[in-house]
Amino acid sequence: CNIVIMSEEATKKLSPMSPVVSPMALLYTSCNFSRNNSIWRKHLEWKKLLSVFLGQMSQTVRWEKKWEPMCYIKGNSKDYTGRRSNLVPIKLTSTRKVPSRESGFAVPKFMFINICSLTKTKNRVRAVVALEADLVNNDIDICVVSESHLKPEMPDAVVTIHNYSIFRRDRSWEGRDMRAKGGVAIYVRNNLKVIDIYRSSLYELIGVTLLLPTGNRMSIYGFYHPPRHNYLESDLLDYLINISDDVLDKYPDTVIVCGGDLNSLDIKHLEELSGWDAMVDFSTRGNACLDNCLTNRIDLFSKCYPFHMLTKTDHMGVILPAGTKLKPMRRKVEFRDCRKHRKEDFHKALAEEDWEDVSQSTNVNDAVNCLERKIMDHMNKCMPKKTVSISSRDPYWMSPLIKSLLKAKSRIARSQKDRLSLINKRISDVICQNRRNFRALVGSRTWWRKTNDISQRNASSSRVTLDNASLTRLNRYFGELCHDDSYVEPTLSIIGDEVDIPSFTEQQVWNALKRIKRTAIGPDYATGPSCKG
């Protein structure tokens, strides 16, 4: 019969364990049972001690990983062959706890990225459009963006994302640091209630305080620690800990999540000072871990993981999943089906209606009430009101009409293929129409796209020529865009001979126009490219 014993090399390779479990290692050497009875007696003593230790472990919290290597005996003896009582389970524990859904509450899902400019365009795709796709595909509630490269004079509409609110802290926000690039921004889904916003005047740091649907408070701090800075790292850590301590003094149950591109910041020292836990344990740029996130409630979140962003950047994105996800906000919406065939039925019903009661009525109020009653009766018959439930996580093209059609489709039996094919075509048509009609609030983005196409500013060829027809078309485009029917042409003022009229050469005019920025507008609100053309 063979019995396992401890190897001396095992204790050097394994991490420290409980004093009871430490004699039992993963690596064993075999010896003969009949030749060494003292080992068997020692094994029985270990088994007795392990039963006490394992009983204590069953009362502790749930752990992330469990290993159960078995120490067992093989032999032909009657007492031990085929018995499971000779199996001794050894559980090697991990110090990292897994979030327990029973003790926690629902929290948002986070994303931390270094996008290297929110305004850039790579492969004809704007960074904001690619970021929106990442947020929708990963169902992100809050996104912390480092190196936004935004300037205070740039409006939020340029980098807005549908169904999200943006909060910015640009590098030159208060004029203390006028260097280019840098900056940090936080996107928050509209179904989350923001109750406070904090922007630091000393560092590239912004804080957003949320009131979660469960009634708990959460403070999110996004900051960018550049490689070259003009402050002490210890001052930044003290500043961050002080503002978080002020929040915890007022609201001790506040959940704090802090993250961004930290570069060479001493994360271990920050963990020691604050008591927070760093969540990122993988490389985010090359072999270095530059992006990280920390929290004081690690039990509320799952293990974070990296992902490749759609836009071009040399950093990996970090997603911090929630232990328990937030429920989407749902609301009841009442609408009318106003499609073309419904309007045609409504028009036909109004044309066939007898309106003598309205025209022959001597009382104006009775005539109006009768007219309104007949119109509403036909409207409710041809375009009845419907009620559907709209979720905050629905895509932008998901309208109440599509929800109603999907609900009607679910009532159709699978055997009725003709009806299913017809309603599928109607749903597809409505989705395509909603996608075409959707217009995000992006300021003058459409105008600039049209201007660039006509002026060939983004053409790949180095030789760009604009003929008179193209210039006329460009001028006509802005003329139709800014047309005003109430405009009255002013009368020309008479200039006498005594007035000295200044003269300019063509070169002087060209030099003046050359110094105008591309996005500048003149007194007549004409764009720079149109003036240069």
Image (tube, rainbow, N blue to C red):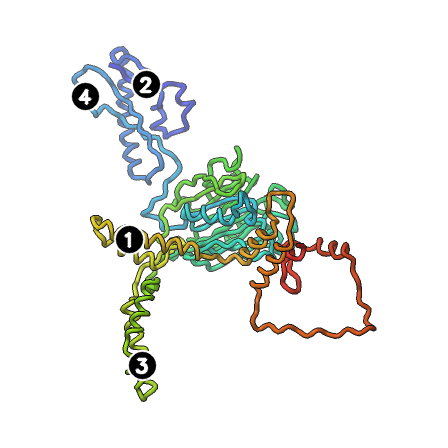
N-terminal label among 4 and 2: 2
Mark 2, Cα crowd under 10 Å, few <14 / some 14-19 / many 20+, is: many
Residue at (28, 32) in percent of width and height: 52
**Which structural element holds mark 3?**
helix
Contact between marks 3 and 4 (CB within 8 A): the answer is: no
Q: Nearer the viewer, residue 367 or 407?
A: 367
What amino acid is found at the position of numbered circle 4 in the picture?
Gly
Mark 3, Cα crowd under 10 Å, few <14 / some 14-19 / many 20+, is: few
Outermost residue, top direction? 35
**Which structural element holds mark 4?**
loop
Q: CA distance from mark 3 to mark 2?
A: 98 Å
Residue at (35, 58) in percent of width and height: 390
Which residue carries the number 4 mark? 82
Q: Nearer the viewer, mark 3 or mark 4?
A: 3
Q: Quadrant of the C terminus?
A: bottom right
Which residue carries the number 1 mark? 422
